[in-house]
Image (tube, grey):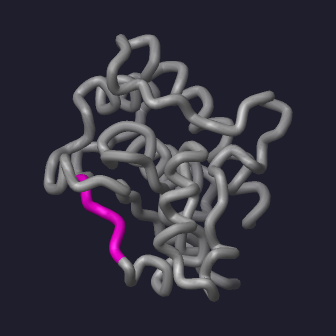
């Protein structure tokens, strides 16, 4: 079976894309399908390169049994378009940034992460960075729904 290479992308790679990477890896492993996927995350910006995920994201994920402690933020690289099968943006701005950077032959690899979950009634995971802890819980709810839908679609 084909191994899918997925890159989750947000602005700084310390909140939403970190959550998506951790959640997706966790649910794929729980489903016995972890070996079918290679997952990573990146940010379109460079502010947090080398930093761990936001402590509020780490805490929210930990409350659901998901460990983000090994992750470190990185910036999107040109080679990511060759290396990954799908580049999944957390919001429309990040998708636009990805499409501006993507070589024409790879633009079809770029999608919104929540595109596969129309029943949610939203297509973006809001950035919880400037809000309180509730924002991280809400983002995590959306990320979990998106991750489950993505896993079902790809496996």
Q: Position of residue 140 (x, y in %)?
A: 51, 29
Residue at point 70% right, 54% down? 150
Outermost residue to the front: 100
Q: Position of residue 16 (x, y in %)?
A: 44, 39
Outermost residue to the right: 119
Query: What secondary structure characterizes most of the magenta part?
Result: loop
Q: Is residue 96 above or below residue 61?
A: below
Quadrant of the frame with the C terminus: bottom right
| Magenta highlight on residue 75 | yes
| Magenta highlight on residue 14 | no
Q: Nearer the viewer, residue 60 or 124?
A: 124
Q: Position of residue 81 (x, y in %)?
A: 49, 79
Quadrant of the frame with the N terminus: bottom right
Label count reads 0
Q: Nearer the viewer, residue 132 or 4?
A: 132
Q: Quadrant location of residue 50?
A: bottom left
Looking at the image, residue 42 sits to the left or right of residue 121; the answer is: left
Residue at point 53% right, 47% down? 93
Q: Position of residue 30 (x, y in %)?
A: 57, 50
Looking at the image, residue 27 sits to the left or right of residue 64; the answer is: right
Looking at the image, residue 127 sits to the left or right of residue 111; the answer is: left
* Residue 144 can be seen, yes or no: yes
* Segment tinted magenta in the rendering: 73-77
Residue at point 57% right, 38% down? 143
* Residue 26 can be seen, yes or no: no
Residue at point 18% right, 55% down? 49
């Amino acid at each position: 079976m084909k191994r899918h290479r997925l890159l989750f992308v947000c602005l700084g790679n310390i909140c939403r894309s970190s959550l998506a990477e951790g959640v997706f890896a966790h649910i794929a492993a729980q489903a016995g399908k972890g070996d079918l996927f290679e997952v990573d995350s990146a940010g379109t910006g460079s502010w947090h390169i080398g930093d761990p995920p936001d402590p509020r994201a780490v805490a929210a994920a930990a409350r659901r049994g998901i460990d983000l402690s090994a992750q470190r933020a990185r910036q999107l690289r040109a080679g990511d378009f060759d290396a990954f099968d799908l580049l999944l943006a957390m919001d429309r701005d990040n998708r636009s940034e990805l499409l501006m950077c993507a070589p024409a032959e790879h633009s079809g690899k770029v999608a919104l992460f929540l595109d596969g979950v129309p029943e949610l009634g939203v297509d973006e995971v809001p950035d919880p960075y400037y809000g309180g802890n509730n924002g991280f819980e809400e983002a995590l709810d959306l990320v979990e729904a998106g991750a489950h839908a993505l896993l079902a679609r790809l496996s």
